[in-house]
């Protein structure tokens, strides 16, 4: 339980300093200035008092309970200080100092050393090399942190390893006049982890929204579990940076992480039901909307404005994000006509005109809040000097207080002149934004979360006819032989064991046997050279397609024999499937997570257009269905230009079968079914590859 | 010349009011409060003074010169008041009142009436139904406008019909503490037009950047010319809303314009070299950067930061926008290593660490400003309490003052606490933004403008062998016969006249003649039923492809005869081109502009993926080349999977030939070359259609 670090009764600062610009001074100042409700104990062997507080030579001299001890001392003294903490009964240590694992093996050793002491006493460690935590809960007002953003109380909690970005986000809320609940930035995270904090925030009643920033995940499985649990209870807004190769490199240089574009993080957020962002500003604005608004029950938005253009901008954004702007019913239009100015437009967007009054705005808001045709209301509101903008703001505030449906406001004004109007909206916790695009995107985020949360999770299909042990035996044989690449026969025997629909196949030792096998299968056939000792068989003429008779097979096999001079050369003969749409499935092991599953159309779609989608295993039926929908070329699966579509149910089942196979056999590093021929009534795997 | 409206010596307000909430009062107040340097003359038959100024019963009583007269009176009185303006020698009338063409035929009549009077006296009219203008030039300080944003002097000028969005943009600059130069929102724009204002701003020395917002263009050709001229002299930043069908509908409902998604506006901006935006916030931020920074000469950016994460976010955005982050040279790295802290990272991004000093920042900025490997510098700067942030800001300000290369800053701070630091950057006109993404996008906009301005315009290819008169004769014949759709023979005769590479063709009156024609052409052939009286011939079995001999042609023709019962049925026989990549070209008349030219790959690329690009005619060689590059499927033209690419020079020439054809024959409403077969050594038009 992290209660003690977020709700400490007493905080000691080991390394408390009298120097204004020292972190050991700033932490004390922040605690004092923020009004920490517990005891503050500066520890400094040489000072009697610091910032007017009695200082103690040793932590052990402190009379009161110390739940949290900050350490603002050189790394090498930390293990020793940790002993004192243990003796004093400190529950959490926040190590602001750096000089640990982030600096190399020397620092890593120190990190290990203090962790051993901490473990001995049951102390949890936050950091090191971190900012710390802030809890705005009036019962605590714990500013255990050396940053400089002083938040009001609020419902948004922020958690991130990276202090820089966490602080930027925090400043974003503060600049918008929006409070926060808990702030946690834990640097090296040697003990208390991000998933653990997310778990805590999920259970924290005061937290209505969780905002997180990551550049990569250290404990993907724990993260997936924590975010899944949290997102089921409250919105989790997440941003991942380091998306480009260069960005990943930049991230690696300051986190010491791996410089790679990782796909898994996106898939984890997707699976967990978090709302992801690529723009920190958009995430900040969305969080402000989530903090005060109920969640929409659909995607139909009513727009009200007193100036045309901003509603056009918002409409573009909403529609672009998949929201709809249904018209008002005839009855409602007629009713509004009676209230609004004659020149007002009662379509959606409703334009009450610049001269529109509070009464007009109220009538429109009420109509949309009461009408089942709308799930949310977006109010654009410019403040002309000739209308009573305070009254308009009061009506918006009043409607917002009813919390019937989400309401977001685009307030276009000079905040220095219209302080009263602004204050009314702020007081009522109306989420308002200066730009129409900002308000529209915040609204779109509310709806996106609704869509994510209401999408069916689906079920994991059980395949009863599977002979897993057989497949495992084949893998183990290959492993025993020291091979990483399976032979075609092994691959197809595994596919058969798992019930994959494949083109019928035989193996043969020589050209005559190949011709005989082909006759058994029926023509036309494909002939492939199969030799574990040879890697690039197809480059060496090791594949011949569309062979029409036994002679052709024999000749092709003989040609392969002379091209590929290998002792273990055998032949793989397979029915040739001439028709069908080529699709491609793949699986790639993702350490700590299972596999990434890929699906896409073959040929130019994968090579030129990179039109593929990914999911984490295990893939449910609903997810497999969404994979088919999510590729750009999806209409080709449904059938275009008068052509019949393909058997999508069979494709979805194939995806799940692959998911099951790699889940059962995690030693598979990479596996491709490429291509799979998709026909109108079935799918057939015509080539496959497995690497361990 | 619009000098008189932007630089008036005297301003009269016809309809001046003593009521605080009346526009006729507000305009006077704004002029007074903003410190207008000329005479202010309230006109009101019943008042002696308004806001402390002497009021006049009639405009004709005003003693001084009146360059601008505001009209804040009911529409019906405007024509009469215009007479007074004429007699007084007023040069510009700004009509703030509404009630004109925007309300319907009645108002349109009044608009016509006052325009006649204005024409008689040579008065230019701004508006009606408009906000008006603001000029912050200290010599004038003309706030001829009833809005409420009071800008400081600056270098950004804003022009838009839509007052709502223009004002939002204006507020955006004001909120960022950035001044503006000229503000102009002209509502109905019955006389002074947006292109005219853009022309004026292009010539205004105080304007360094022009920002405009449109929902559609009334005078596309004039707009294209004005923006082209302006963008050649200074950056023109443009946003178009109403991009979705719903957005266009919303726009139409308040502008009375056409509800359509228009492509032409984007193409006009592209052709003109303007920088377009779909996000008003991003446009505001870019304008702030353009207002003070020199233009970059390339796309290589150096990043400096004192906190890691924000630089990762920025790197993602820069790289995603096509910018590069080259490494520092070994020599520079070595030199920085001597100055910076040992743990600092001297890669790009350079991380000077949170404890990094002013000297560190300066060394990095100097290195990048002097190093030819960089075209611009992005500085991320969080303000920890333990460093001298004022000194860092002073160094940034100093480097910025040298204007060697563009510099953009991401200042992460609490602006209420770090007022001194913020003030130093503001004073020095350093463009700074709170979020790393904002700063990176502003930087990306600078580079995007550089790319647009440095792309070769190219030349319009002259085709000497063209027989334009012949083509015109064919069109005129069809027009004389009252046909909008040309027969295949007519289409191909026009293509031949313009030297298009087509598959050889013949026409035939009956099945026997068709068979004979096919023999002349050589097999295989395509046979098409050609009958101007029948529209959907292909649906009626009117096309037969890949006919291998004379019998097949005869049979196919007979089958068509029995399927299509038309007196004017003839046959079109053409060589069948079995190979090649299918591409599609199209042209569509755009009133007032010429034609939109389309290019894309055929088949699923156009039908499923909508992978097509457009340009305005006339298309230059450089533009044609860029069209080939801009489609997603471009790699297919270059050749993938070991296949040879297609003859791209021939394709580019084909695009230009089509551009020439529709430019010569503007009565062509729509024309398709679909498909064109593109081969490795040539291109062949295999089907075409022309509609008048």
Image: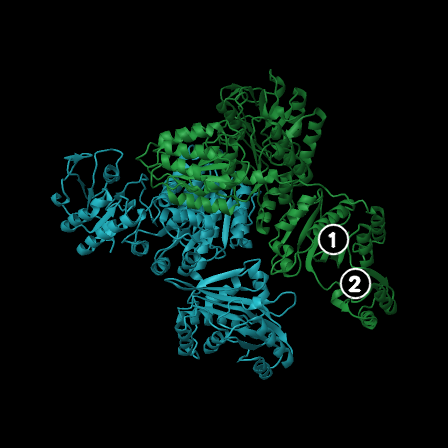
Chain colours: A green, B cyan
Q: Is residue A54 above or below residue B504?
A: above
Mark 1: which secondary structure?
strand
Q: Given this view, does label 1 or label 2 mark the residue nearer the observer?
A: 2
> Does the image show residue B183?
no
| Farthest-out residue, top | A63
**Quarter that holds the N terminus of chain A:** top right
**Image quadrant assignment for residue A458:** top right
Q: Label 1: chain?
A: A
> Does the image show residue A457?
yes
Q: Residue at x 52, y 65 (%)?
A: B628
Q: Which residue is mark 1?
A: A671
Q: Which of B433 and B423 lies nearest the eye of the viewer?
A: B433
Q: Which of B331 and A276 lies nearest the eye of the viewer?
A: A276
Q: Residues within 10 Å of mark 1 (few under 14, many from 20)?
A: many
Q: Is residue B360 left or right of residue B65?
A: right
Q: Residues within 10 Å of mark 2 (few under 14, many from 20)?
A: many
- The span from disc 1 to disc 2 (Cα, nearest Å) is 21 Å
Q: Which of A633 and B252 lies nearest the eye of the viewer?
A: B252
**Image quadrant assignment for residue B152:** top left
Q: Position of residue B638 (x, y in %)?
A: 58, 67
Q: Which residue is mark 2?
A: A575
Instruction: Choose the circle earlier in sequence order: 1 or 2.
Output: 2
Q: Label 2: chain?
A: A
Q: Is residue A498 left or right of residue B396?
A: right
Q: Position of residue B338 (x, y in %)?
A: 53, 47
* Label number found at residue B642: none
Q: Is residue A461 above or below residue A398?
A: below
Q: Is residue A83 left or right of residue B423?
A: right
Q: Residue at x 63, y 65 (%)?
A: B640
- Determine contact: label 1, label 2, CB under 8 Å: no
């Amino acid at each position: 339980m992290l209660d003690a670090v977020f709700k400490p009764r007493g905080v000691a600062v080991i390394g408390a300093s009298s120097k204004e610009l020292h972190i050991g001074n700033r932490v004390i100042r922040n605690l004092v200035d923020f009004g920490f409700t517990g005891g503050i104990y500066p520890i400094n062997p040489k000072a009697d008092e610091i910032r007017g507080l009695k200082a103690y030579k040793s932590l052990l001299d402190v009379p009161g309970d110390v739940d949290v001890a900050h350490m603002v001392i050189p790394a090498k003294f930390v293990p020793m200080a940790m002993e004192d903490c243990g003796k004093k009964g400190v529950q959490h240590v926040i190590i602001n100092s750096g000089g640990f694992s982030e600096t190399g093996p020397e620092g890593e050793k120190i990190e290990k050393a203090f962790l051993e002491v901490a473990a001995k006493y049951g102390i949890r460690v936050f950091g090191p090399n971190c900012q710390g935590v802030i809890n705005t809960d009036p019962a605590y007002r714990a500013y255990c942190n050396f940053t400089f953003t002083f938040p009001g109380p609020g419902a948004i909690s922020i958690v991130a390893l990276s202090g820089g970005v966490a602080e930027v986000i925090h400043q974003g809320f503060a600049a918008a006049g929006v409070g926060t609940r808990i702030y946690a930035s834990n640097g090296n995270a040697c003990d208390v982890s991000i998933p653990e904090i997310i778990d805590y925030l999920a259970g924290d009643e005061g937290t209505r929204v969780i905002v997180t920033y990551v550049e990569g995940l250290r404990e993907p499985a724990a993260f997936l579990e924590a975010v899944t649990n949290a997102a089921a209870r409250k919105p989790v807004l997440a941003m991942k940076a380091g998306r480009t190769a260069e960005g990943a490199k930049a991230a690696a240089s300051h986190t010491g992480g791996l410089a790679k574009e990782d796909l898994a993080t996106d898939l984890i957020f997707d699976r967990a039901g978090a709302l992801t962002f690529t723009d920190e500003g958009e995430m900040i604005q969305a969080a402000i909307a989530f903090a005060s608004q109920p969640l929409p029950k659909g995607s139909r938005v009513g727009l009200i404005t007193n100036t045309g253009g901003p509603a056009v901008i918002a409409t573009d954004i909403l529609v672009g994000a998949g929201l709809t702007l249904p018209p008002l019913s005839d009855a409602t239009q007629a009713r509004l006509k009676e209230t609004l100015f004659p020149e007002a437009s009662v379509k959606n967007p409703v334009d009450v005109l610049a001269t529109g009054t509070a009464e007009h705005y109220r009538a429109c808001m009420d109509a949309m809040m009461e009408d089942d045709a709308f799930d949310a209301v977006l109010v654009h509101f410019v403040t002309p000097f000739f209308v009573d903008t305070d009254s308009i703001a009061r009506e918006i505030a009043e409607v917002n207080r009813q919390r019937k449906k989400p309401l977001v406001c685009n307030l276009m004004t000079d905040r220095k002149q219209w302080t009263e109007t602004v204050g009314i909206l702020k007081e009522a916790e109306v989420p308002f934004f200066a730009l129409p695009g900002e308000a529209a995107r915040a609204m779109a985020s509310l709806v996106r979360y609704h869509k994510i949360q209401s999408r069916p999770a689906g079920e994991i299909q059980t395949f009863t006819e599977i002979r897993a042990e057989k497949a495992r035996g084949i893998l183990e044989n290959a492993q025993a032989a020291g091979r990483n690449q399976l032979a075609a026969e092994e691959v197809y025997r595994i596919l058969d064991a798992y019930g994959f629909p494949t083109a019928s196949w035989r193996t043969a030792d020589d050209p005559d046997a190949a011709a005989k096998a082909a006759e058994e299968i029926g023509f036309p056939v494909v002939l492939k050279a199969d030799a574990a000792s040879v890697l690039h068989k197809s480059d060496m003429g090791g594949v011949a397609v569309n062979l029409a008779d036994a002679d052709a097979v024999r000749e092709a096999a003989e040609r392969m024999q002379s091209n590929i001079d290998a002792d273990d050369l055998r032949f793989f003969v397979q029915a040739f499937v001439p028709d069908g749409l080529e699709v491609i499935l793949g699986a790639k092991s993702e350490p700590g997570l299972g596999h990434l599953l890929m699906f896409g159309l073959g040929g130019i779609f994968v090579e030129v257009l990179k039109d593929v989608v990914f999911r984490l295993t295990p893939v449910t039926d609903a997810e497999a269905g969404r994979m088919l929908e999510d590729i750009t070329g999806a209409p080709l699966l449904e059938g275009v230009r008068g052509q019949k579509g393909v058997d999508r149910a069979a494709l979805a089942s194939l995806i799940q079968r692959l998911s099951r196979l790699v889940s059962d056999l995690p030693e598979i590093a990479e596996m491709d079914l490429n291509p799979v021929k998709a026909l109108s009534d079935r799918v057939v795997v015509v080539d496959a590859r497995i690497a361990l």
